[in-house]
Amino acid sequence: MPGPGRPTPGQPGEPADPRQQAPADFEWPTVDDDFDEPAVEEVRQSGSGYVDPPTVQVQRLNQGPRPPQGPPGQQGGPGASRPRDAAQQAPVDPPTRPVQRPQQQPDPARQQRPAVESPTTQFARPLPPQERPQPPRETVGQDTYGQGGQRPEPLRAEQQRPEPLRAEPRRIEPPSSEPPPSLPVEPEPAEHENDAPEVTRKGGRGRRKMLIIAGALILVIALGVGVVVGGDKLGLFGTKAAAIQPPPSPTAVVPALRPVGAGSPAPTPQALAAVLDPLAAAAQLGTLGGAVVDPATGTTLWKKGDTALLTPASSAKLLTAAAALLSLNHADQLSTKVVAGTEPGTVVLIGGGDPTLDSTPAGKENRYPGSAKLADLVNQVKQSAGGTISKVVYDISRYPGPDFANGWDATDIAGGSITHLEPLMIDGGRVDPTEDKPRVANAAQTAADAFARGLGVSAPAVKGAAPQGTKVLGEVRSAPVEQLVANLLQISDNVLAEAMAREVARVNGADQSFTGAAKAVRDVLTKNGFDLSGVVLNDGSGLSLGDKVPAKLFADIVTAAAKPDTAGDEKTAKLRPLLAGLPVAGGSGTLSGRYVSGQTAVGRGWLRAKTGTLSNVNSLAGLVVDNEGRLLVFAFMSNVAQEPDLGAARPYLDTLAAALRNCGCH
């Protein structure tokens, strides 16, 4: 009995009951126009041999007259089949849903053959007409539907299925009076075939879920076992862990370098005098002034002529450096600036007191590490000027008064010791930026001309005054004050020392001249508790033979910088960078070639000091660590009436300082 949605047997053009012979003009459906609501078939295999008619919805299209059938021998009856040549068929649209194949009656001849696994139901999405597949070609026999016809084969699992529609499926239920349609499944052995349990597609999905759940349970169990086993080995469950061997005893380390301080024994004055007095009596030293101080206690351990006013030479830079550190902000920088001139195409270069301005190309540097580049200033002005530059003016009004100090010798310019002091310089006034000597005689003009050439101005720069309130076209800055102080001590640079003395004068309200700078240095040191009684200063570098300083003042300044800072002394904190600037014996600066051989080599690396050398003058002031780790401060000054050679007394001073390193002196 036909169910809902099935064609009634016997109607023209529709298939008859599948248990009867199909009429000669039978044709499989070629189209299903139900695109919006595709059907879902749920199939079962029952235990009986009854085969339900196919659950196929067939619709006859109104496509005109039926195409002619094949030759009489192929229109029906046994062995009849559909034409296989697509050209012989009338054009039809392919089905939009796979056609359910009917389940056959059990065939005794085929019972031993395993059935094809039940295919998965799929839904076809509409394809463009040119992509739609041709309808399946089946042979309609009469063995099952009549007599002697061929049985339709079940679908093969490897056959291509159309992809499903993306729409909500609709279920077509079979009539309640007939067994539900079924698909073939793999049979059990023949003797149990009729007893096989009912299998549904939902059951297939259930089996997969069960397999997934079973796999997950196995994984959880395996992880649990791993945790238990690993935890047992790690002692997490109360089991006794493996015994851990104690670490070996630490190796005793005796550092070669130990911090200095009051913990080490200090020399006694008597023992120290027994070592130093014979060395200080050398005739080559002439008039000697010296002092040795324990900075941890402030006790003077040895002295000889320590208050005598002697020519200090370059050791006088200790006074300038100390005054700069005590009065200037350690992070301050010296500036070189360019402003627009009052005339079109004119720029004015203003000297700001920085003698370290570097004229070397990129990748190189002059004798002042960290100095500003002249090329950077040139580039800034080119970008800011906004037109052609035809004239360069330079302003050096920052320094009033003479540019050459009392007691200086003009021959020292060619010797590289000094030049005329002006607030505008490049490379400290050196001819070769990387060599100490010689120096140029007109440092400001040389710097201004180099700047002009960088701008493409061929005419020499001219001296003048900078206008007020004009546009700043460029500016570069020196290294910080703290670094400048260290540099002037390391290489004993007279020009840089004079520039720093003038900065001390500027911040203390004095003239930025030789006289004003010398007075400002004295005032700053006196204000900070140092005794400058009788001290004479003509410059800030010690180059003048007229400068007079006692050895005690040098010892007091170094002691203030080296003493323990546990008390929070502000003066000590400001002066501490002075120690870092002192040359290292046999290692750096003006001491790099000394203490490298002979009996003085014992002091190599253990001694730091500021040197001083002029004709008939030698001095050395700094600190040393003795062989028991005690830090000692010393100052030795030698003035002779007639020195046979420059620096002839120098080795004797080195011997005195090296004796301190070699001495426990209890």
Image (cartoon, rainbow, N blue to C red):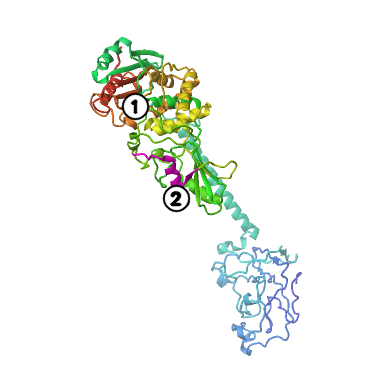
Task: Tell which circle, 2 or 1, labels the residue nearer the N-terminal end.
Answer: 2
Can residue 276 be seen here? The reply is yes
Q: Residue furthest top?
A: 270
Region rendered in magenta: 438-463
Q: Give the amino acid at mark 1.
A: Thr
Magenta stretch contains residue 663: no
Q: Residues within 10 Å of mark 2 (few under 14, many from 20)?
A: some
Secondary structure category for the residue under label 1: strand
Mark 1 Cα-neighbour bin, 10 Å: few <14, some 14–19, many ≥20:
many
Q: Is residue 629 left or right of residue 113?
A: left
Residue nearest the observer in this picture, 386 or 102: 386
The percent coordinates of residue 225 (x first, y second) are 50, 40
Disc nearest the viewer among 2 and 1: 2
Residue 440 painted magenta = yes
Q: Nearer the viewer, residue 436 or 45?
A: 436
Residue that badge 1 annotates: 611
How far apart are the alpha carbons under marks 2 and 1? 39 Å
Residue 82 percent location from the top left of the image: 62, 82
Which amino acid lies under the numbered mark 2 shown in the image of this protein? Arg
- Residue 517, relative to residue 356: is it above or below? above
> Seen in the image, is 616 located left or right of residue 154?
left
User: For mark 2, what is the residue?
Assistant: 453
Q: Nearer the viewer, residue 344 or 386?
A: 344
Residue 574: image x %, image y %? 48, 24
Task: Relative to 408, say whether 385 is above or below.
Answer: below
Of 615 and 188, nearer the camera is 615
Q: Is residue 248 visible?
A: no
- The N terminus appears in which quarter of the rendering? bottom right
* Element class at badge 2: helix
Looking at the figure, which quarter contains the C terminus? top left
Q: Which mark is residue 555?
A: none
